[in-house]
Amino acid sequence: FFIMDHVPGRIFTDPAMPQSTPAHRAAVHEDLARILAMLHRVDWRAAELEGFGRPEGYLHRQVALWTRQWQAARMEDMPAMDLLAQWLPDHLPPDDEPACIAHGDYRLGNVLIHPTEPRIVAVLDWELSTLGHPLADLGYTCLTYHLPPDFGGTRGVAGEDLTGTGIPDEQAFVASYCRHADREPPRSLDVFIVFSMFRLASITAGVWRRGLDGNAADSRAGTTEVRDRYRGLAQMAWALAQRLGGG
């Protein structure tokens, strides 16, 4: 069953937040980092969430899961997806982080902002939440810095000049998260970015497949726009993987 409540607020689907002031954008992004860190610091054992997920082996399980999802959704040859499925297991970092509650889809578009104030009042869309790796969650949130503004349903700010906008760059956002999480900044999030792109590409390929099969609720699911979105994610992920080496 669900316990639900109405929370008034605003949703920003455009990560550039064009109707906001620089001060407003800065405050919202600071709160975005703070709330994610706060979630990751929840004592899930004390909250009796042992059955919420397996705390060990999250990254390898996730790669295996989304590889299976891709194979089930496959409608065409997409070498980048197959190469990523081979590359990721060999390049995942050691799974030595304490498990946390991982939201799985944490981003600006999935939080409610107070009707008038620049602060978060609710976090939405918990379907992918489980016990997982904090940096995988953070890496997904940082996808916005790697996706262009015109990238279909998952728009980002890559290539945009953020100077004076109030939107922090990726390094500043990660530093803010780490300050709130009371941890040292990671040496790199790049592998987590590759993983997040691969996972999102698998999800999007599944949406496209269901659209073509006539099993999707959204009539746009089987369009070339959705197809091109998954292809673009796969190609961007593989390009980044090659830059990291071992490709």
Image: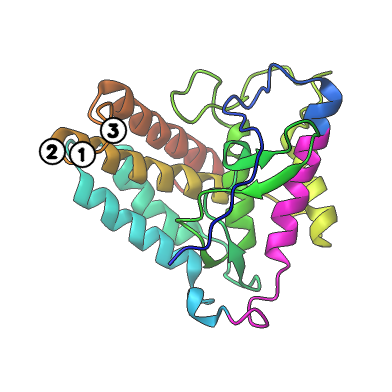
Q: Earlier in the sequence, mark 2 or mark 3?
A: 2
- The picture quadrant where one finds residue 24 is top right
- Badge 1: residue crowd in 10 Å (few <14, some 14–19, many ≥20): many
Residue that label 3 marks:
218
Q: Is residue 39 magenta?
A: yes
Q: Earlier in the sequence, mark 3 or mark 1?
A: 1
Is 139 placed left or right of 230 in the picture?
A: right
Is 156 placed left or right of 173 in the picture?
A: left
Give the CA distance from mark 2 to mark 3: 12 Å
Between 140 and 16, which is closer to the camera in this rendering?
Answer: 16
- The picture quadrant where one finds residue 205 is top left
Q: Residue 58: tell me if it is visible.
A: yes
Give the CA distance from mark 1 to mark 2: 6 Å
Please tell me whether residue 195 is drawn above or below residue 60 in the rendered image.
above
Between 96 and 98, which is closer to the camera in this rendering?
Answer: 98
The mark found on residue 213 in the picture is 2
Please tell me whether residue 115 is drawn above or below residue 4 in the rendered image.
above
Q: Secondary structure at mark 3?
A: loop
Q: Is residue 192 magenta?
A: no
Q: Residue at the spot x=39%, y=28% of the render?
A: 232
Query: Outermost residue toward the left?
Result: 213
The mark found on residue 209 in the picture is 1
Q: Position of residue 197 (x, y in %)?
A: 46, 42
Q: Position of residue 219 (x, y in %)?
A: 24, 28
Kindly indicate whether the residue at mark 3 contacts the one at mark 2 (C-beta within 8 angstroms).
Answer: no
Q: Residue at the spot x=78%, y=44% of the render?
A: 31
Numbered-mark total: 3
Q: Secondary structure at mark 1?
A: helix
